[in-house]
Each structure stands twice: as structure tokens, then as C-alpha cells.
Amino acid sequence: MIIKFVSIYLFIGVLLLSFMFVNSFMRGKSSYAKAFGALSLTLQVYLLGYLLEINASSLPEMFFWNQIQYLGIPFFPALWLVVSMLYTGKGKCLQGFRGLVVFAIPLITFFLRLTNDWHHWYYSQIELQQFMGVTYMLLTKGPWYFVQTAYVLIALVLCTLFYFQRYRNSTGDEKIQFRLLLLASVLPYLALVLVTVNVGGIGIDYTALILPPCILLLYLSLTRYNFLEIKDLARERVFEDSRAGLILANRFYRVVDFNDASIIFFRWFNASIKEAQLEFLLKDHQDLWACIRNSEDRVFHFLVEGEDRYVNIDTRIVQNIKETVGYLITFEDVTERECLKQRLTEIANTDELTGLNNRRRFREGAEETYQQARLCHEDLAVLMMDIDFFKKVNDSYGHHGGDAVLRDFAAMLRETFGGTDVVGRIGGEEFAVVMLKTDAERAFDKAEDFRKAVAEKTIVFGEKRICVTVSIGVAELNDAITDFDALINRADHALYQAKHSGRNRTVVENQKQP
């Protein structure tokens, strides 16, 4: 009668575990859903083997089905622990070598049980025993059995601890859920005590009887509020699957979690990421560390394998009701955006034909240089230039010929003037240069060298050769000049004098002409 009752109970348990396995492993998309599916499978094998063991009629049959149980028995405590760690956000602890350590004892147990006839380390003696007309297989425990029992106890304690930590910090429905998880992790303690003490002395496996309601509680607690599909999927898709690097740090800026994308960004910084203080990880990048510490939103430039890369770093404060508990730091690759911004800025600031500063950008740069010269009491000179008889060039060679002249003229300007000089195309055939730390005499000398080089230059346009000259006006900053417009006007006036005194010459403002 007892055997029938237990058999029916175990059969129902196997069916339930089959359902949990299929539902969690096949439909669940989260990492701990897969782990829960594997846990259900190991328990299913365990219960099915025990069901067939207690219904076997001979010792060899019982022994065979007992061995089948050990395809699942050694591994369910490890998987129980893995589920709790993944669900409570401690999955990073399972990466690499530490993940193998969790399964080390179960693997040894599996091997020792399979080879028990050779050494009897797991079961020292196996025999049949009668109790109330029922035949049981009595297993006398060997030394490794107690090692496995200690491992199970440690796994259960850790599960209970992880769930209790989350329970303390949860509210509302989540608190109810973690009560169920705590209950599911506490009940196996009872089974462990009953099996170790061997209550009744009849060798009943109390663990097989207590685990079905425990696993059912575990399943219900994970699915009751749809956390299995919603909460973890949200985390995985937003955190793990994000193309942006995401780092979760505690309130002391110690890394507690990070996604795979963040590893790539840290390689750009020539650093590695691990569970350590960010200040230590970014010791060679104090600007990054200061940005994170000050919760700034900034873009940083890096040279990665000879290519320009731009990273936007944003720090968000994570708070509970009372205080700051941590920081979520986002690293986003904004290289394409920044390059586009630079390109648009370049287009907005550059004369399309010559590649020089356009009128607006020249004006901005010239004003900045003028203010610097005023503030630091430095010399400043302005050159205004005009290509002589440019209309005749367009009339003789067409606008394409004129464009060729403008491009070559601009190239000569770039070669001659640089550094702190501001060069720009003002419009048409008119150009300007602002020269910092340069007085009128030195500006005149450089302008004359440039004028002579232009006059000697032959511009090739197709099969034709074009020669042009340039007139230049020079003005320098002095105490009588109150703003930049006044300085430009003086240089422009000097240019007017150069053109009306014969062209192809340089004239300094207020200088008497021959």
C-alpha cells in the first residue's frame, strides 16, 4: 500500500517536472529559465529512477535504477544554486573557472557512484531489507557520500542567503515572490536531515519525496509574476544585448556588473574591466574618471588602431527611496555621429571651391585673433588681396578656367601662410589673411614674397597656360584702431591704393606711394 501511494506521488512529480522542463527550457528565453529547465530535467531523471527502483523485484534491478538516478542527483544542487545566482543578479560569479568549480563536486560524485563497485567510497554496503512486507534497498553510506551531503548543504545555504538578501530589499509583489523562493530553499533542509539520520531505519529517500513540492514552489514563484519572461528579458535585452557599454557600480564606484560591450570600450582605453574600483581601472585616464565621478555627459576622442574613435560617457545615479546606491555608466560609440558633425561643420565653415575658410568662418577666427592681440598686447597685421583682372580670366578661359586659377591661388596661400595665421576667401577673387605677432614691416615682406611667387606662377588649364598677378593691401593694429572692422577697412583701403596705382603691388596703409 505504501509503495503504491509513493509510486503515484512520484509519477505525478515526474509529470510535473516534465512540464516544467519543456515550458522553461523551450519557452524561456532568459539564462536562468534555461538553468531551471536543466534543474527540472535532473530532478525528473532522479524521481523516475527512484520510482522504478522501489518497484523493482530484485537487488540487481534496484541497483541499476539507483545508478540511473545518479544521472541527476549529483547535479541538481549545483543547478539549484545556479538558478538562484542568475535570478538574483550574481551570474558574473559563474564566469570562467568559477563556473567549473560549482560543478566539480557533482562530477566527482557522478564518477564515484558509477564506479562504486571498485572502491565503495560512495556506498560502503548495499543490501535488501524487509519492512512491513515491503522490500527496500538499504544503502550504507561511504565517506564521499558525506562530502556530497556537505556540498548540498553549502549550496542550499547559499541559495537561502541570496534569496534572503533580495527579500530584504524587495517590496510589494516581489517580496511575496521571494518569500516563496525562501520557502522552496528551506524545505530541502528537512529532507537532508531525514536522509542523513535515516529516520525509521528503512532507507527511504526523503529527498525524492520533499523535492517535488519544493520545485513546484520554485516554479510558481518564478512565473507567478511573469518575472521569468519580463524582468530578465528586459535586463538581457537592455543590458546584455545593448551595443552600448553598460557598467553598474556601487556607491563606492566598485564595478558589480557589466555587459560584453563594455569590454570592447575598455580595450579602446588600453584597460581591462573586472569587479574592482573604477578609479583603479581608469588610473591611466584621469579625465574619464573625473567625468564619471562628476556624473558628466561628455564625448572623448581615442586613436584605436590608427583610426579616430569617439565615445560618449554618461553617468546616471541609481537611488532607492533613501539614498544613492550606485551608478549606471554608459559608454556609447558616437564615432559616426561626431565625424558627421565635423563634416557638417567643415562644410559650413569652408569655401567649397578653394577649401579655405569661408567669409563667416574667417570673420570668427579673425575676431578671436584680434581679441587675443588686444589682450596680450601683441602685433597684428591684416592682408587684403585681390587677383588682378580676374574678369578677363573668366571671359578668356571660361568659369572653369577661373575656378582653376582660384584653386591654385588658394593652394599657394595655404603653403605661404599657416600656424597662427587666419586665411580666408572673402568673396569672388578677394582673399584675406590675419597675421598674429606680425607688424606691418614683416607683413609687407611676406606679402611681397607671395605677390612675386604669384606673378611667376603659370597655371595649367587643359592645354592652356594662365598667368595672373595679385594686389595686396596691408594694415597693422595700433592704438587708434578701436575694433576689427576698422582694421579691415584700413587694409581694404590699402588694397584700393595698390589697384589704383598700377596693380601687381603691395601697399601698406598710410604709406606714401611712388
Image (tube, grey):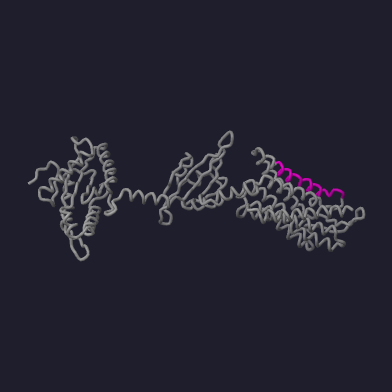
Q: Can you say whether 482 is above or below 221 in the image?
A: above
Number of marks drawn: 0
**Relative image position of residue 212 (x, y in whole percent):** 77, 50
| Residue 486 visible, this orientation | yes
The residue depicted at 19 percent of the width and 37 percent of the height is: 478
Which residue of the protein is positioned furthest toward the bottom in this rendering? 463
| Residue 446 visible, this orientation | no
Q: Can you say whether 100 is above or below 171 in the image?
A: below
Q: Does residue 352 belong to the magenta stretch?
A: no
Q: Does residue 194 belong to the magenta stretch?
A: yes
Magenta segment main secondary structure: helix
- In the figure, residue 112 lies in which quadrant? bottom right
Q: Can you say whether 483 is above or below 275 in the image?
A: above
The residue depicted at 19 percent of the width and 41 percent of the height is: 489
Which residue of the protein is positioned furthest toward the top in this rendering? 322
**Relative image position of residue 477 (x, y in whole percent):** 20, 39
**Relative image position of residue 406 (x, y in whole percent):** 23, 55
Which residue of the protein is positioned furthest toward the left in this rendering? 514
User: Is 377 left or right of 64, judged from the image as shown?
Assistant: left
**Which residue is at the front of the view, 202 or 388?**
388
**Relative image position of residue 408 (x, y in whole percent):** 23, 57
Magenta stretch in the rendered image: 179-200
- In the figure, residue 182 lies in which quadrant? top right
**Which residue is at the front of the view, 58 or 342?**
342
User: Is 93 left or right of 362, judged from the image as shown?
Assistant: right
**Which residue is at the front of the view, 282 or 329?**
329
- In the figure, residue 10 lies in which quadrant? bottom right
